[in-house]
Amino acid sequence: MITSRLSSKAQTTIPQPVRAALHLKEGDEIVYAIDGATVVLTRAPKEQLDNPFTSFSEWAGEADRRAYAGL
């Protein structure tokens, strides 16, 4: 089992074996999924971070991609 300690500022370091398993590097974002008393930590998908409109399916058409490409 891999552990880390919570600081007085509610911060923790992600242990190296976890960073290696998720291929995390400085600046990467992580996602927390909470299910009762269990939390699953995953690496945020890169395409989700690069395109702020991916969560809006109504803006997922080709015309919308062209219209928002220069933003």
Image (tube, rainbow, N blue to C red):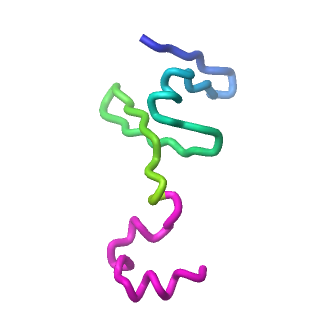
Q: Residue furthest top?
A: 1
- Up-down relation of residue 61 to residue 14 (above or below): below
As for residue 35 lying within the magenta part, the answer is no
Magenta segment, which residues?
A: 49-71
Q: Nearer the viewer, residue 21 or 48?
A: 21
| Whole-percent x, y for residue 57 in the image | 33, 72
Query: Relative to residue 49, is residue 40 drawn left or right?
Result: left
| Residue ID at (66%, 21%) | 7
Write down the quadrant of residue 61 in the picture.
bottom left
| Whole-percent x, y for residue 67 in the image | 49, 88
| Residue ID at (57%, 44%) | 28
As for residue 56 lying within the magenta part, the answer is yes
| Whole-percent x, y for residue 33 in the image | 37, 39
- Quarter holding the N terminus is top left
| Whole-percent x, y for residue 19 in the image | 53, 29
| Residue ID at (45%, 71%) | 53
Total labels drawn: 0
Write down the quadrant of residue 39 in the picture.
top left
Write down the quadrant of residue 35 in the picture.
top left
Query: Relative to residue 4, is residue 66 drawn left or right?
Result: left
- Up-down relation of residue 16 to residue 32 (above or below): above
- Up-down relation of residue 33 to residue 37 (above or below): below
- Quarter holding the C terminus is bottom right
| Residue ID at (45%, 28%) | 21
